[in-house]
Amino acid sequence: MKSKISIKAIIVDLDKTLLHTDKTLSSYTAEILSECKRIGISLIVATARPLRATKDLFDAIDFDAAVVSNGARIICNGECKEYPIQKDSAELFFSEMTRYQDLRLTLETGDRAYSNKPIENYETTLSSDLGSVAKAEKVLKIIVGIDDDMTEGIVNGSIPENTYYTVAGGFLIQIMDKRATKWNGVKAVLNKMKISEKEVAYFGDDNDDVMPIKACGIGIAVSNAIEEVRAVADYITDSNDDDGVAKFIERMIL
C-alpha cells in the first residue's frame, strides 16, 4: 500500500459515508477536512440530499462545490445548474400512480418537498394532487417509499423513458431525469474546476456511488457500504460511525 496518495480534490457522499448514522459530523472529521483545505486540496460534496439539507454542513466545512439531489442540481464557482424532470413526464408519472393509493410519494423541488402522506423526520407539504404540483413546480426528484416487494416493479413499469431510478438504503426509490446522475454532476464540477477525474479521491457507500468510485483516480468505500460499492473500490476504510473517511485521509493523503 502506498504511504501517501497525491490528489487535488476529495469528493464525499454524506449520509452513511461522511456523516455518522445519527447525521452528525464528528469534530475529528471536521478537523481533517479543514487540514485538506489548508494544504490546497479541494473539497466537493456529492449527495442525494437537496441543497437545503446541506446548509448546516456547508456552514461547518468550506466545501468548494456540491452535486446535490443525485446530480439534478450542481453548484460550482458561484453558478447553479439544474436538470429537472420534464413537466409532462412528471405529470404522467403521478397520473399513473393514482392507481396505487397506498404508495408513499414525494416530489422534491430542491427548495421544498411535497408528499401525499406524512413522512417521519422529513419536512414536507402534504398534497393530495402531486400531479398539479408537478405542473406548477420544477421537479428535481421523485421519491417512492418501498413498503413491499411490489413497489419497485410498479415504478419500473411506470417511469417515463427520459427518467431513470436508483434505490437508496434499500427502502427508497429515487427517480430523476437521465441527465441527473452523481457521475454527470461530478464530471461537470471537475471540468469547471479544471481537475482531472484521475486526480480525485471519491468516498461513497450506495448505488449512486458505484460509477464515481470506479471512474475516479482513487475510489474508497466505507466498510458499511453495499457489496456493489465495496466490490469496485480501490480501498475499503472504516465505517461512517468510525470516521472511516477522515481516518483514510489522515493516513493515506495528509
Image: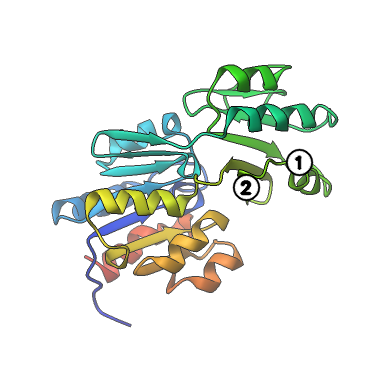
Vertical arrangement, residue 227 with respect to residue 174, above or below = below
Which residue is label 2 attached to? 164
Which of the labelled discs sits on residue 158, or is there none?
A: 1
What SS does tag 2 mark?
strand
Q: Residue at x 85, y 30 (%)?
A: 99
In the image, farthest residue toward the left: 39
In the image, farthest residue toward the bottom: 1
Q: Residue at x 44, y 55 (%)?
A: 183
Q: Residue at x 43, y 52 (%)?
A: 184
Looking at the picture, which amino acid does disc 2 mark? Tyr
State the image coordinates of residue 167 (x, y, percent, origin top left).
64, 50
Label 1 crowding class (10 Å Cα cut-off): few <14, some 14-19, many 20+?
A: some
Give the CA separation, mark 1 to mark 2.
11 Å
- Which mark is first along the chain, 2 or 1? 1
Viewport quadrant of the C terminus: bottom left
Label 2 crowding class (10 Å Cα cut-off): few <14, some 14-19, many 20+?
A: some
Position of residue 117 in the picture relative to residue 181 (left or right)? right
Q: Nearer the viewer, residue 64 or 236?
A: 64
State the image coordinates of residue 29 (x, y, percent, origin top left).
32, 52
User: Residue 215's quadrant in the figure?
Assistant: bottom left
State the image coordinates of residue 192 (x, y, percent, origin top left).
26, 48
Position of residue 229 in the picture relative to residue 33 (left or right)? right
